Each structure stands twice: as structure tokens, then as C-alpha cells.
Image (cartoon, rainbow, N blue to C red):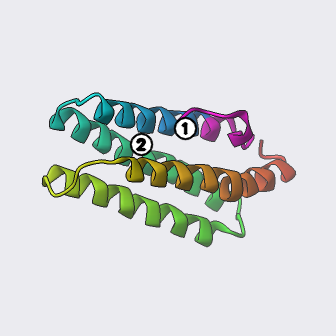
Amino acid sequence: MEWESRLTIGVKQFDEHHKELIRIISELKESMHNGENHVYIKNLLFELVSYTKYHFTAEERMMEKHNYQLFKEHKLEHQKLTEQVELFLDKYSAGKSDLDDQIFEFLKKWLFEHILETDKKMGEYLRVRGVI
């Protein structure tokens, strides 16, 4: 999973956040395929959860500050993904689940679709209003 220029939304801070999320997910997948130990992978999952929450909070503050009309829908998407990633972490930490390619495909699909559809709309909204 790599950064692609088509993922740029025009909000530098959020573009950098998206690159970091992609880096964490890629490292997680590579670590799993390389047979890294359980604790290392659990820590990467925790990093993914923490960074995802940090990023979503930053986006939500920006949307709220500028009265973004799709704020509630956007925030709901964030909540659903956060819950799903926390579930991955909880199951993995409890030894109830291994990470497999399906999880990574889910994360990639969700992140790319969210950026290309939902975040691009937010970026355009902010651009039209001269915020960025």
C-alpha cells in the first residue's frame, strides 16, 4: 500500500496524516507477513488506533470550525472505522484473531474510498471558502 497523488485533498496537514496512516498500515502488513512477534504487531495496531483518532479529531475540529454541512455524516464514517480498528486490536490482543490479508484489504479500501470521496469533498469545501 503506497501513497498515490490522486489521494491529495489539498489540505497539507491532512495529506500528511493520510501518508502516515498508509505508512502504519503498510508496516503492519509487512510485519505480519515477516512473522514479527505478537507484541510488536499489537503495538503497531495500537499506533494505528491512536493515530487514526488523532487524525479524525483534527479533521472534525476543522470541519466544525468552518461549519461544514456534511460534518455529521463525515464524523459518523470516522466513528465506524475507529470502532472497527479497535475491534481488530481487541481481538488480536486477546489472541482471538490473527491478522490476515482481508483486514488489510478492508483498511486500504476504506481509507482510499474515504479520502477519494468524503475527504475530497471536505477539501473542496475548505478551498472554496479560502481556508486553504
- Report the side of 108 relative to 122 (left or right): left
Q: Which of 87 and 58 lies nearest the eye of the viewer?
A: 87
Q: Where are the magenta residues, as a range?
A: 1-15
Q: Which percent across, then down, holds residue 115?
A: 64, 50
Residue at image coords 82%, 48%: 127
Q: Which percent across, then down, holds residue 64?
A: 62, 61
Quick one: SS at disc 1?
helix
Residue at the disc numbered 2:
51
Please say if 72 is above or below 7: below
Residue at the disc numbered 1:
17
Look at the image and tell me whether residue 61 can be seen. no
Question: In the figure, residue 84 lies in which quadrant?
Answer: bottom left
Residue at image coords 47%, 50%: 105
Question: Which part of the image, by quadrant, shows the C terminus?
Answer: top right
Q: Amino acid at mark 1?
A: His
Q: Which mark is residue 80?
A: none
Q: Which percent across, then down, holds residue 95?
A: 13, 52
Count neighbours of disc 2 (C-alpha within 10 A) and say few if under 14, some if 14 to 19, many if 20 or more: some
Please say if 67 is above or below 20: below
- Report the side of 33 relative to 8 (left or right): left
Quick one: SS at disc 2?
helix
